[in-house]
Amino acid sequence: MDAGERPALGILAGGGAMPGRVAGAARAAGRGVFLVGLDGFADRTVLAPYPHEFIRIGAAGRILAALRANGCGDLVLVGPVRRPSLLDLRPDAEGTRILARIGRAAFAGDDGLLAAVVRVLGEEGFRVIGAHEVLREALAPVGLLSRTAPDALAMADITRGVAVAQALGAADVGQGCVIQQGIVLAVEAAEGTDGMLARCAPLARPGPGGVLVKLVKPGQDRRADLPTIGPETVRCAAAAGLRGIAFEAGGTLLAERDATLAEADAAGLFLLGLDPTTRHREGDMT
Amino acid sequence: MDAGERPALGILAGGGAMPGRVAGAARAAGRGVFLVGLDGFADRTVLAPYPHEFIRIGAAGRILAALRANGCGDLVLVGPVRRPSLLDLRPDAEGTRILARIGRAAFAGDDGLLAAVVRVLGEEGFRVIGAHEVLREALAPVGLLSRTAPDALAMADITRGVAVAQALGAADVGQGCVIQQGIVLAVEAAEGTDGMLARCAPLARPGPGGVLVKLVKPGQDRRADLPTIGPETVRCAAAAGLRGIAFEAGGTLLAERDATLAEADAAGLFLLGLDPTTRHREGDMT
């Protein structure tokens, strides 16, 4: 790396389109990028336009070497990664050393694991930044983004959903749940948001449809794995018979903003950004 | 009703075999029984051997009249009932009056609704008792019931599951979750325990299988809707690749005890009754 050059942005890429969007935004800002696609998660067509290498998640030594060889200083972790079991991991020598440093956190909740990974990457000399620091426009704002607005019943369902998601987050489980007419239809765990939405249609009651609520977990490191809403989320919500999506403003990545809003307006769904400074009070009202 | 005769036991019957077991135990103790089968939930073959009537859940006036006409004093609520939406309910005149008395609780969590229903039935002159007061042998004891015992990894998964189930219970959601190698695979909501177990196989990681944890919710009225473990629960858990089930002793109905234990031993699953007086401490260890 030349001494005067700004270090390249390294991207540890999980699934979906977000790694490519982060790479595109960095390159548009005149910055070099290098992506490490995590084997089994990252999408080859998303990474193809950029310099990249596919490495399995357990080969931490190879990942760190590739990032260093390509002059990466800042790092973004973006795109869903199904948390591996230790048996899946097959750590290399460096991976084993890192696992030892992570210690018990590897067996605790996702937050503990992610926070530990961010800490170890910092100790290795990288600066982990949030995807939203590269993609500022992608952080969802407070307020209504769609033409359709939630009615009083939907607002009551959102309030209940916030209380449920907060309880889940405190136990470091998922970030999402679906509420219909006060009934908790579904709670998100390892299946992910789209997987949870896929089971809601047969559970739904007649009458006004439910809402999806997604929050940032209380202890969550905002540099890793923020909840993401995109066109596919809206399509899954519509297919599940929902009437809208409420999410934490400033803590949710809005992927493909125009396409997401167009999809919501076409389906008549609302998209509501909740103010994180007031949502605790709302939660108390249940 | 004759003045000297002990009032009959009324049974408000949801799904499954438990209503018949409660009726059989009461009759074996020389007591008269009358069952109200809730339309769409109660099983005709289960109710057939006993005097009964099928009534839809919204027709509260007809339900109360039938219980009174058949001399019922004590009431047991037993068997799963999918919580209806208000549109499903189509309350009759008495049902509308009762709904007004329940008020906001009808829109809060399940506990709020059940507690309100028990209160209203009390105000109507009935004494609501727990199924376990009729079926004393059906309350699961503390300790290991199966030949297979949980290993250290399974015990760690149970500890994590207790913490998750407690957080869920505090938000008045489900009573169950599945943990594998520290990862929360699934959390139970409206789909019920068997529905949750049905989605676990594809979410499971390689290596040692997970555990199902079922607890009584902290605010739960123990006279209504205790968690139940039966042979079908064990079959679903085995099909999901789980290694065992941990449940709250003294707060879990063990349906068909012999068949349940035989099923667990045949499948090599453990069944572990958690002591509710110590489980909070266990939960703190995570």
Image (cartoon, coloured by chain):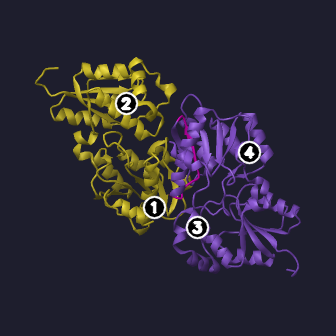
Chain colours: A purple, B yellow
Residue flagged by tag 3: what amino acid is it?
Answer: Leu
The local secondary structure at tag 4 comes to helix
Residue A176 part of the magenta-drawn span: yes
Residue B261 in view of the camera: yes
The local secondary structure at tag 3 comes to helix
**Residue A196 percent coordinates (x, y):** 59, 46
> Residue at the spot x=51%, y=72% of the render?
A104
User: In this picture, which residue range is highlighted in magenta?
Assistant: A171-181
Residue flagged by tag 4: what amino acid is it?
Answer: Pro
**B131 on left or right of A229:** left
As rendered, which of B119 and A77 lies closer to the eye?
A: B119
Neighbour class for label 4 at 10 Å: few (<14), some, many (≥20)? some
Distance CA(mark 3)–CA(mark 4): 29 Å
Above or below, A261 relative to B185:
above
Distance CA(mark 2)–CA(mark 3): 47 Å
Mark earlier in primary sequence (3, 4): 3
Q: Quadrant of residue A47?
A: bottom right
Distance CA(mark 1)–CA(mark 4): 34 Å
- Circle 3/circle 4 CB separation < 8 Å: no
Residue receiving disc 3: A113
Res. B160 mark: 1
Distance CA(mark 1)–CA(mark 2): 36 Å
**Residue A20 percent coordinates (x, y):** 79, 59
Residue receiving disc 2: B43
**Residue B247 percent coordinates (x, y):** 36, 53
Residues behind callouts 1 and 4 on a single chain: no
The local secondary structure at tag 1 comes to helix
Q: Quadrant of residue A123?
A: bottom right
Residue B39 in view of the camera: no
Q: Chain of mark 4?
A: A
Residue receiving disc 4: A231
